[in-house]
Image: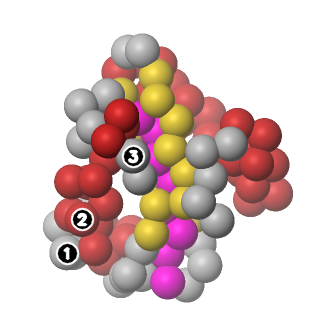
Amino acid sequence: MDRTSEEAHVLYVLECADGSYYAGYTNRLEHRVKAHNDGRGAKYTRSRRPVRCIFHETFGTKREAMQAEYAFKQLRREQKTAYMDQKGGCDR
């Protein structure tokens, strides 16, 4: 994760210990990933720790980032992987 993501509007994707993906929005990426790993993140990730950030994309506004998060969550896994590969910013 890079420092440019801090205090920005970010769509992020975590890979959970069970291999599943979790997507979310934040404006403090490193803090949010730490919260997930500390068990203070989403209910979904609490039982699937540790998680690691495998993708993030920065947007100009909160609305754009949240719309991207919603759209990403509608995709099938293969489509999610293709999206991350196409956009870059992937740490897989």
From the top left corner, tell me how far across and down residue 90 is, in percent: 62, 52
From the top left corner, tell me how far across and down residue 70 is, in percent: 53, 35
Kindly state the secondary structure of the residue where label 3 is placed: loop
Q: Judge whether residue 26 can be spotted in this image.
A: no
Q: What residue is rendered at 32% in x and 28% in y?
A: 8
Q: Which residue is mark 1?
A: 38
69 w.r.t. 23: above or below:
above
Q: CA distance from mark 1 to mark 3?
A: 20 Å
65 w.r.t. 34: above or below:
above
Q: Which residue is mark 2?
A: 34
Q: What amino acid type is highlighted by mark number 1?
A: Asp
From the top left corner, tell me how far across and down residue 25 is, in percent: 38, 40
Kindly state the secondary structure of the residue where label 1 is placed: loop
Marks 1, 3: nearer the viewer: 3
Q: What residue is rendered at 46% in x and 29% in y?
A: 58
| Upstream in sequence: badge 1 or badge 3 | 3
From the top left corner, tell me how far across and down residue 41 is, in percent: 25, 63
Q: What amino acid type is highlighted by mark number 3?
A: Asp
Kindly state the secondary structure of the residue where label 2 is placed: helix
- Number of residues whose C-alpha sits closer than 10 Å to that of mark 2, classed few (under 14), some (14–19) or many (20 or more): some
User: Which residues are the magenta region?
Assistant: 10-17
Residue 2's disc is 3
Quadrant the C terminus occupies: bottom right
Q: Nearer the viewer, residue 51 or 75?
A: 51
